[in-house]
Image (tube, rainbow, N blue to C red):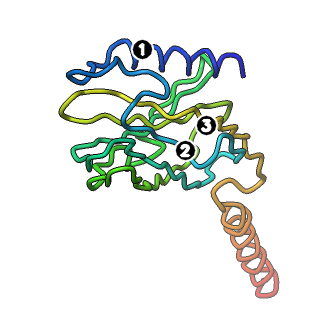
Amino acid sequence: MRRVLAVTALLLATSSATSAPARGSMPAGIGSDPVTVRLDRSAIDTSLGGRIELTSTVRNATRQPMSGLIAHLNVFSTDPGTYVDPEDWSSHRTQFPAAVPAHGSVALTWPVQAVNSGRLVVYVAVTDVQQHRVTVSMPLELTVSKRQTVDPGGVLPLAVGVPGAVAVVLGLVLLRRRRTA
């Protein structure tokens, strides 16, 4: 949990430090951003291969409709020995929402499939193409358990059935030879 909070703090500090402030406005910071993004949950437990759907809400805090936004989903592991390729987790990681009305919001859904086990972090970052300001959601803690199964991929009937059928056929052939001999 500490590692997740540290990474989140680093992401927020980096996005605030590197985003260009709008002309005539204060630098971006928590609570002062014209755009906020929020995930519908803060934690999920699932198993390897599990499919989940996340929803993020992009809110416009200004008096003007806002267009040209880009939302991006990211996934990373808190275990330094685990490599995560976010493209394996979702094939729809970047969305271009329609204009967000003044003081309004837009909901975006993200289909995700767990392909690594362990403790992971999921977040959504939103930027606008005019000012390049980046806003990051709070992290979602994703715990993916290994799936212990006797029948991985549903091959057990085939793995047992084919040799069993061959044994029955051989037994019948041997029985027929004995009767004719």
- Work out how far the residue at label 1 is from the one at label 3, CA to CA, in angstroms: 19 Å
Callout 3: helix, strand or loop? strand
Pointers 1 and 2 in contact (CB under 8 A)? no
Locate the N terminus by quadrant: top right
Residue 170 versus residue 64: which sits nearer the camera?
64
- Residue appearing at x 18%, y 33% in the figure: 130
Q: Nearer the viewer, mark 3 or mark 2?
A: 2
Q: Which residue is mark 2?
A: 39
- Residue 14 is tagged as 1
Q: Which quadrant holds residue 42? A: top right
- Work out how far the residue at label 3 is from the one at label 2, CA to CA, in angstroms: 7 Å
Task: Tell me which amino acid carries mark 2.
Answer: Leu
Q: Which residue is mark 3?
A: 140
As displayed, is residue 51 above or below residue 88? below
Task: Tell me which amino acid carries mark 1.
Answer: Thr
Residue 27 versus residue 14: which sits nearer the camera?
27
Pointers 3 and 2 in contact (CB under 8 A)? yes
Q: Position of residue 6 (x, y in %)?
A: 61, 15
